[in-house]
Image (spheres, rainbow, N blue to C red):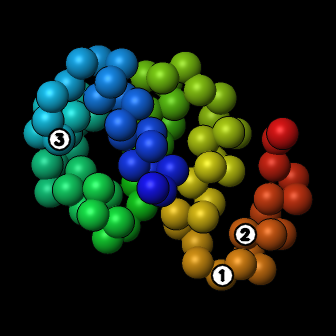
Amino acid sequence: MTYTIELLDKVKAKYDLGSDYQLAKKLGVSSARVSNWMKRKNAMDWEVAFQVADLLGIDDQKVVYGLLKDKYENPRIINALQQGAPA
């Protein structure tokens, strides 16, 4: 499971959303975008990620570092960025 999917599932659970369509409405995005995130076609963009952080009460920095692996495939980039990651 990707961090993107983990976050989306947490929003669905917290707000008792029974479908990806309801999740899309909650986030103000199209259901096609949510579907692409769930199918791992792409990672959620930063604007939505911070909206999700606010909905879940998660620190922005934790969300940023959590999404790095979803957004970047180059392990060298991930390692370089995670050296400053919060514990």
Q: Residue furthest front?
A: 1
Q: Which mark is residue 1?
A: none
Few, some or many residues within 10 Å of mark 1 (<14, 14–19, 20+) = few
Q: Is residue 33 visible?
A: no
Left or right of 39 in this view: 11:
right
Going 27% across and 34% down the picture, which residue do you hit?
Answer: 27
Label 1 and label 2: CA atoms lie apart by 7 Å
Q: Is residue 23 visible?
A: yes
Q: What amino acid type is highlighted by mark number 3?
A: Asp
The residue labelled by disc 3 is: 20
Disc 1 to disc 2: CB gap under 8 Å: yes
Label 3 and label 1: CA atoms lie apart by 29 Å
Quadrant housing the N terminus: bottom left
Front position in the image: 26 or 79: 79
The residue labelled by disc 1 is: 74
The residue labelled by disc 2 is: 78
Of labels 2 and 3, earlier in sequence is: 3
Image coordinates for residue 53, horizontal then vertical, percent = 51, 31
Front position in the image: 72 or 40: 40
Disc 3 to disc 1: CB gap under 8 Å: no
Going 36% across and 28% down the picture, which residue do you hit?
Answer: 11
**Element at badge 1?**
loop
